[in-house]
Image: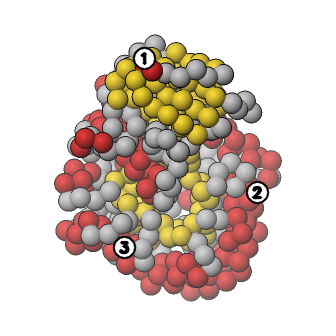
């Protein structure tokens, strides 16, 4: 890994996310940025750019913080392309296909799982994602959940124990027994490799009582709380997450006024996953309603083999603008600083002195082009920890 100093100059538009002058993106024009030892050391006018060991000329392009993808399921095996085809032909999404992936994941070797995570992580990095959260949830045995998290931890420090994804087939008639196992031996085996705990709190998965019990056990083991909530219909998940001080409640597709009020009065982030709605032909979350209420909103890919098999944050930014009534600036902020807030990280999602030097150089003059030119590979270069990738 090459260290030392690096200056990126001739930046036409620099998105800092410092919130100065009432602009959440903190945009600077004709800027430069100095990186030292993997961190942002200085930002300022391009004409005052300091000397450095290396130089990158942005050529008037836009520079943004690296995307922070705070919701991804990358540890799996198998393929569910036929399921997508069935949905496009009119079959509703119920979440039932998760068990198909569970069977394939249990049968896969560690090397096969590691190769899938590595491939998807590399895809994400090429598309500007420099920080990613990775969940377990396709093993659903003590050994398989622990190995999923052990492998995930090789690629990120934000790992999430999702043993409560669905009740596996062998416990279909004994959900209480499965919850007991999740709270007991499975949590004990998973916790050393996890930072977070998550539950799929939906009809057909885990109800509020089971979710509360599992999340409380995770908190007692020192894990932070996240929650899949209100994706398939209205339910108790969002308010349960707020009650427990969750860092993030994710999906938030079907919200009542009480849900929105609870989020607005809390520090819990609403993480929206438009790739899932795109891939399931479901209604999109109303981001405008949340933003107007003062809720902190993040965007993430929900990359998984069944309901959102995309690794592209630029695609999710474009969807958020087109389908969820977000402005381009709001979507970019949600995909960077919003994701950092959902992970309770202060070192990523911004480009200010002291932050980690994770940045992307667009092949475009402005962040607006992420929505203006959907589907076009606009990421010219990525720096991760100050190192060009």
Q: Residue at x 61, y 26 (%)?
A: 6
As drawn, the label of residue 47 is: 1
Question: As displayed, is residue 44 above or below residue 358?
Answer: above
Cα separation, mark 1 vs mark 2, equals: 58 Å
Please tell me which of labels 1 and 3 falls first in the chain: 1
Give the SS element for disc 1. helix
Frontmost of labels 1 and 3 is: 1
Residues 99 and 121: in front is 121
Residues 237 and 358: in front is 358
Q: Residue at x 62, y 34 (%)?
A: 36
- To which residue does mark 2 refer? 107
Q: Is residue 361 left or right of residue 5?
A: left
Q: Residue at x 70, y 32 (%)?
A: 3
Give the SS element for disc 3. helix
Give the SS element for disc 2. helix
Q: Residue furthest top?
A: 59
Dot 2 alpha-carbon crowd within 10 angstroms: few under 14, some 14 to 19, many 20 or more: some
- Answer with the quarter of the image where residue 105 lies: bottom right
Q: Residue at x 69, y 60 (%)?
A: 149
Frontmost of labels 2 and 3 is: 3
Q: Is residue 336 left or right of residue 140?
A: left
């Amino acid at each position: 890994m090459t260290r030392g100093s690096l200056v990126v100059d001739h930046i036409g538009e620099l998105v800092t996310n410092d919130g100065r002058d009432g602009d959440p993106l903190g945009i600077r024009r004709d800027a430069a940025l100095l990186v030292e030892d993997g961190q942002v050391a200085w930002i300022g006018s391009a004409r005052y750019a300091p000397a450095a060991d290396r130089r990158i000329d942005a050529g008037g392009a836009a520079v943004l913080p690296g995307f922070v993808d705070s919701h991804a399921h990358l540890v799996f095996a198998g393929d569910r392309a036929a399921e997508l085809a069935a949905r496009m032909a009119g079959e509703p999404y119920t979440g039932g296909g998760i068990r198909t992936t569970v069977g394939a994941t249990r049968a896969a070797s560690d090397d096969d799982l590691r190769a899938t995570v590595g491939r998807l992580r590399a895809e994400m990095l090429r598309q500007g994602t420099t920080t990613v959260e990775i969940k377990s949830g396709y093993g659903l045995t003590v050994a398989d959940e622990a190995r999923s998290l052990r492998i995930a931890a090789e690629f990120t420090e934000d790992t999430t124990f999702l043993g409560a994804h669905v009740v596996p087939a062998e416990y279909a008639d004994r959900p209480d027994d499965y919850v007991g196992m999740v709270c007991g031996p499975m949590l004990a085996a998973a916790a050393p490799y996890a930072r977070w705990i998550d539950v799929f709190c939906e009809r057909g998965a885990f109800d509020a009582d089971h979710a509360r019990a599992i999340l409380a056990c995770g908190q007692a083991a020192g894990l932070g709380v996240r929650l899949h909530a209100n994706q398939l219909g209205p339910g108790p998940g969002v308010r349960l997450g707020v009650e427990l001080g969750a860092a993030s409640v994710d999906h938030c597709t079907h919200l009542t006024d009480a849900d929105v009020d609870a989020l607005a009065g809390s520090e819990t982030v609403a993480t929206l996953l438009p790739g899932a709605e795109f891939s399931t032909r479901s209604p999109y979350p109303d981001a405008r309603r949340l933003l107007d209420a003062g809720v902190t909103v993040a965007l993430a890919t929900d990359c998984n083999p069944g309901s959102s098999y995309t690794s592209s944050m630029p695609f999710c930014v474009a969807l958020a603008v087109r389908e969820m009534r977000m402005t381009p600036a709001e979507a970019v902020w949600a995909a960077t600083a919003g994701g950092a807030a959902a992970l309770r990280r202060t070192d990523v999602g911004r480009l200010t002195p002291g932050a980690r030097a994770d940045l992307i150089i667009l092949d475009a003059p402005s962040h607006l082009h992420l929505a203006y030119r959907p589907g076009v590979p606009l990421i010219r270069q990525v720096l991760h920890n100050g190192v060009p990738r």
